[in-house]
Image (cartoon, rainbow, N blue to C red):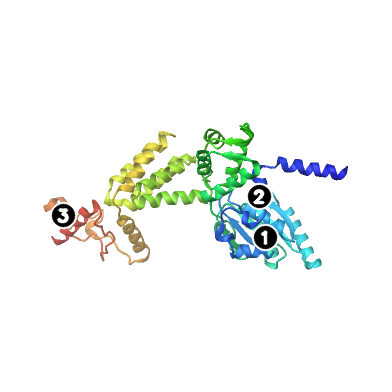
């Protein structure tokens, strides 16, 4: 009776598992995507197959197989396994695990300890330092999982003991493979337009993809003995695309960087796309407007001075308007800055002048320019032809502003050259 009850329990547990858990790969060939690190002959695959995995960090966006691979390794290894979450575990609990690992190493020489630490980026420097001696001595094999760039969030001493493996968003063909496996496992069909919609909206996230499929299956009645997911059902089950945008994480900085570089690179379509990504993710419009202001001054400069005026107007709009209205002046400014001719001559000029002030020779204000000299010796420019007269404005003159041939700056360059000939 006891054996039967245990079997019943196992069957109930299996039936209540989420689809994503049921679809967990049982062998390496079942993994969708990540062939650059799990393909035939790749180092990580060879280590897993030989049960020789060393301390490593798996990083990448959600739903791309980091946790699935770590748990697969845990099932295959002969090591004692601890699975922890850095957002929940304390130093005391962590030290208890490390103490047990040390005991196992010293008293059971053939026994190893594998620690899977999810969200390792939540550990501060002190907590990471607690791990260092155990990783360094080989008392534990540590697999850290994170959605953040480990080079920013893991201290160098610990990171130097890791192999770092980057997991990429899944491709359309990877999600198609997962869908076919799910259809076989759960015995359902998906219309082609529904499959295309689900794959597009999942945005490379297998967990989100499978959760949507599971919700569709729960809410879809049988049709002729089999369930079919249609486009209408798919749209109800995965209504908004996951944008993978954390205002405090790496994706935030990656997207704002792409936005700025698109404006600098004169690509208005890319600029307005990244702008839309930020707005759709709830980014503060004022943050975006400040970046447009900076780009207008730094990268457009005097090649098109109006860009700064347009950018300032967008910034003022961001202070008084909310979504969705603010999207329009922000788009206008971003497109204007992207389309404007570019010059960083003003940026280089002020940086060069600051360098001269800090490290160059001291220069005193010429007497004819000093405030209390009653303009003795000073020549008033407007009293001369073309409102220009040659005179000393700076001892030991040095050229900082070098206008380019771009846009209105070309006119400035030509005027400066003409004045010098007088």
Asked whether disc 1 touches disc 3, contact meaning CB atoms under 8 Å apart, the reply is: no
Task: State the residue in front, 125 or 162.
Answer: 162
Q: Is residue 327 above or below residue 260?
A: above
Measuring from the top left, give residue 218's x and y in whole percent: 64, 34
Disc on the earlier residue, 3 or 2: 2
Measuring from the top left, give residue 133's x and y in whole percent: 69, 65
Distance between the Cα atoms at labels 2 and 1?
Answer: 21 Å
Distance between the Cα atoms at labels 1 and 3?
Answer: 72 Å
For mark 3, give the secondary structure: loop
Residue occupying image coordinates x 76% and y 56%: 96
Measuring from the top left, give residue 122's x and y in whole percent: 62, 51
Q: Is residue 100 above or below residue 173?
A: below
Asked whether disc 3 touches disc 2, contact meaning CB atoms under 8 Å apart, the reply is: no
Determine which residue is flagged by label 3. Answer: 388
Residue 216 visible in this rendered orientation of the protein: yes
Asked whether disc 2 touches disc 1, contact meaning CB atoms under 8 Å apart, the reply is: no
Residue 123 visible in this rendered orientation of the protein: no
- Using the image, tell me which numbered label, if any, was put on residue 50: none
Query: Quick one: label 2, few (<14), some, or many (20+) residues within 10 Å?
Result: some
> Which numbered mark, 2 or 1, is in the foreground of this view?
2
Task: State the residue in front, 217 or 406.
Answer: 217
Disc on the earlier residue, 2 or 1: 2
Determine which residue is flagged by label 1. Answer: 142
> Which numbered mark, 1 or 3, is in the foreground of this view?
1
- Using the image, tell me which numbered label, if any, was put on residue 24: 2
> Which numbered mark, 3 or 2, is in the foreground of this view?
2
Distance between the Cα atoms at labels 3 and 2?
Answer: 78 Å
């Amino acid at each position: 009776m006891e054996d039967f009850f245990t079997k019943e329990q196992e069957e109930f547990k299996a039936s209540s598992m989420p689809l994503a858990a049921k679809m967990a790969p049982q062998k390496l060939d079942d993994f969708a995507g990540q062939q650059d690190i799990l393909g035939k002959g790749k180092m990580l695959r060879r280590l897993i197959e030989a049960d020789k995995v060393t301390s490593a960090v798996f990083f990448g966006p959600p739903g791309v197989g980091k946790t699935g691979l770590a748990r697969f390794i845990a099932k295959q290894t002969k090591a004692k396994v601890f699975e922890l979450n850095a957002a929940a575990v304390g130093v005391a609990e962590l030290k208890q695990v490390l103490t047990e690992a040390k005991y196992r190493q010293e008293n059971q020489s053939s026994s190893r300890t594998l620690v899977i630490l999810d969200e390792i980026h939540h550990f501060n420097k002190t907590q990471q330092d607690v791990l260092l001696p155990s990783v360094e001595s080989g008392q534990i094999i540590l697999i850290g999982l994170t959605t953040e760039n480990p080079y920013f969030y893991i201290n160098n001493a610990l990171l130097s003991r890791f192999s770092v493996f980057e997991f990429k968003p899944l491709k359309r063909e990877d999600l198609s493979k997962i869908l076919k496996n799910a259809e076989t496992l759960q015995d359902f069909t998906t219309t082609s337009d529904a499959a295309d919609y689900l794959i597009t909206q999942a945005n490379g996230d297998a967990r989100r993809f499978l959760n949507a499929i599971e919700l569709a299956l729960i809410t879809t009645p049988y049709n002729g003995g089999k369930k079919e997911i249609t486009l209408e059902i798919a749209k109800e089950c995965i209504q908004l695309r996951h944008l993978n945008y954390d205002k405090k994480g790496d994706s935030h900085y990656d997207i704002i960087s792409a936005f700025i570089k698109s404006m600098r690179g004169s690509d208005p379509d890319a600029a307005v796309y990244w702008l839309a990504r930020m707005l759709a993710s709830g980014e503060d419009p004022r943050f975006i407007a400040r970046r447009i202001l900076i780009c207008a001054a730094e990268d457009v400069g005097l090649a098109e001075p109006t860009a700064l005026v347009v950018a300032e107007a967008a910034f003022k709009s961001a202070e008084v308007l909310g979504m969705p209205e603010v999207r329009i002046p922000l788009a206008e400014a971003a497109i204007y800055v992207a389309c404007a001719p570019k010059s960083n001559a003003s940026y280089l000029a002020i940086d060069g002048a600051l360098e001269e002030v800090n490290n160059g020779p001291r220069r005193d204000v010429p007497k004819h320019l000093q405030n209390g000299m009653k303009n003795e010796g000073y020549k008033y420019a407007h009293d001369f032809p073309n409102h220009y007269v040659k005179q000393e404005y700076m001892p030991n003159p040095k050229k900082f502003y070098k206008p380019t041939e771009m846009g209105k700056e070309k006119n400035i360059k030509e005027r400066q050259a003409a004045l010098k000939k007088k």
